[in-house]
């Protein structure tokens, strides 16, 4: 068997060329495709692993939420119950406050109406008492009772301090000798019955002595006085009559009854 060296050399060159061509145009694209498929497979595996992990996390979160649902339910129920109790307590307190306020207003109205009714009754009773006393006193001898009351009125003027007696005549008279006493002081003497001349003169003399100036009496009759007199000066009045006594008694009765009513608790 004869082996030609050139044939072997050519065969080797052809093999090398074939290997180069395969590597150039076949192996590299195939390897690239294989590498790309491997990379795609790895990406898919990674994405699948990530999806599996996400699903696992979601499952665990759902399980945690499911496990927490009873506790959350109990918490919500307890909160709602607490809020309902607080609202109920607030409503009860508000209702109690409104009821207490209405009760206080009703008690105040009742007390005011009671006080007004009692005041009206007291005034009516006092009026009836004074009217009855006035009717009884009208039958009394007013003439004999007037003189003592006239003396009391004159005594009241005499008992005044000097400055107050001077005030009774202050501004009376405009003549030059008014301060010297030549100007008469006008005094209106009202009596329940006509005064005898002697009683009027006696009163004029006492007033003249008390005031230190002449007095000009103007006599007047006022049956409403029942008994007694009133001395009307320019700026004041001295009253000594049963009319005044009855009026004072009426006011005293009303004050006494009002004080006793205020001291009594409202039922």
Image (tube, rainbow, N blue to C red):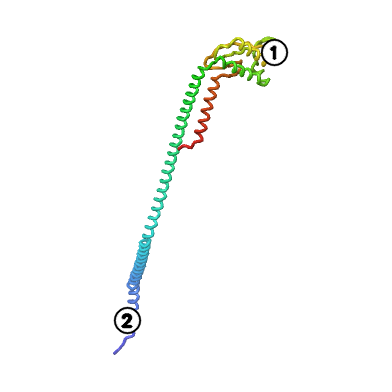
Q: Could you tell me if residue 197 is visible in this image? A: yes
Classify residue 20 as left or right of residue 171: left
Q: Residue furthest left?
A: 1
**Which disc, if any, is residue 179?**
1
Residue 237 can be seen in this image: no
* Residue at 55% from the left image edge and 22% from the top image edge: 245
Q: Quadrant of the N terminus?
A: bottom left
Q: Is residue 179 above or below residue 121?
A: above
Residue 29 position by quadrant: bottom left
- Residue at (31%, 87%) from the top-left corner? 3
The quadrant holding residue 44 is bottom left
User: Residue 99: horizontal and vertical position, in percent?
Assistant: 42, 41
Q: Is residue 146 left or right of residue 182?
A: left
Rendered image: mark on residue 11: 2
**Residue 214 placed where, x, y %?**
66, 11
Q: CA distance from mark 2 to mark 1?
A: 177 Å
Q: Nearer the viewer, residue 9 or 110?
A: 110
Looking at the rendered structure, the number of numbered marks drawn on it comes to 2
Q: Is residue 201 left or right of residue 262?
A: right
Q: In the image, residue 163 lies at what x, y percent? A: 67, 20
- Residue 158 coordinates in the image, percent (x, y): 66, 19
Which residue is at 47% across, 23% downward?
128
Residue 42, picture quadrant: bottom left
Write the residue at 52% across / 32% down.
259
| CB atoms of marks 2 and 1 within 8 Å | no
- Find numbered disc 1 in the image and state the secondary structure of the residue it sits on: loop
Q: Residue furthest right?
A: 180
Name the element at disc 2: helix
Classify 10 Å Cα crowding around label 2: few (below 14), some (14-19), many (20 and above).
few
Q: Up-down: is 251 above or below 138?
A: below
* Front residue (pair 94, 140): 140
């Amino acid at each position: 068997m004869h082996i030609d060296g050139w044939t072997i050399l050519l065969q080797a060159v052809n093999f090398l060329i074939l290997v180069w061509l395969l590597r150039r145009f076949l192996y590299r694209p195939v390897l690239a495709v294989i590498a790309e498929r491997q990379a795609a497979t790895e990406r898919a595996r990674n994405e699948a692993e990530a999806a599996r992990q996400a699903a696992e996390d979601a499952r665990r979160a759902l399980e945690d939420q499911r496990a927490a649902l009873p506790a959350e339910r109990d918490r919500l129920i307890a909160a709602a119950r607490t809020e309902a109790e607080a609202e109920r307590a607030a409503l009860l307190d508000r209702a109690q406050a409104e009821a207490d306020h209405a009760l206080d207003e009703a008690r105040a109205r009742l007390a005011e109406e009671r006080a007004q009714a009692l005041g009206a009754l007291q005034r009516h009773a006092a009026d009836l008492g004074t009217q009855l006393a006035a009717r009884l006193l009208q039958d009394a001898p007013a003439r004999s009772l007037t003189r003592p009351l006239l003396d009391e009125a004159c005594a009241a003027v005499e008992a005044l301090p000097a400055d107050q007696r001077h005030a009774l005549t202050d501004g009376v008279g405009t003549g030059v000798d008014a301060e010297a006493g030549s100007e008469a002081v006008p005094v209106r003497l009202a009596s329940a019955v006509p005064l005898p001349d002697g009683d009027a003169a006696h009163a004029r003399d006492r007033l003249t002595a008390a005031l230190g100036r002449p007095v000009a009496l103007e006599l007047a009759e006022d049956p409403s006085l029942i008994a007694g007199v009133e001395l009307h000066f320019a700026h004041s009045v001295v009253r000594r009559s049963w009319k005044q006594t009855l009026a004072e008694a009426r006011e005293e009765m009303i004050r006494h009854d009002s004080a006793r009513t205020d001291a009594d608790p409202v039922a």
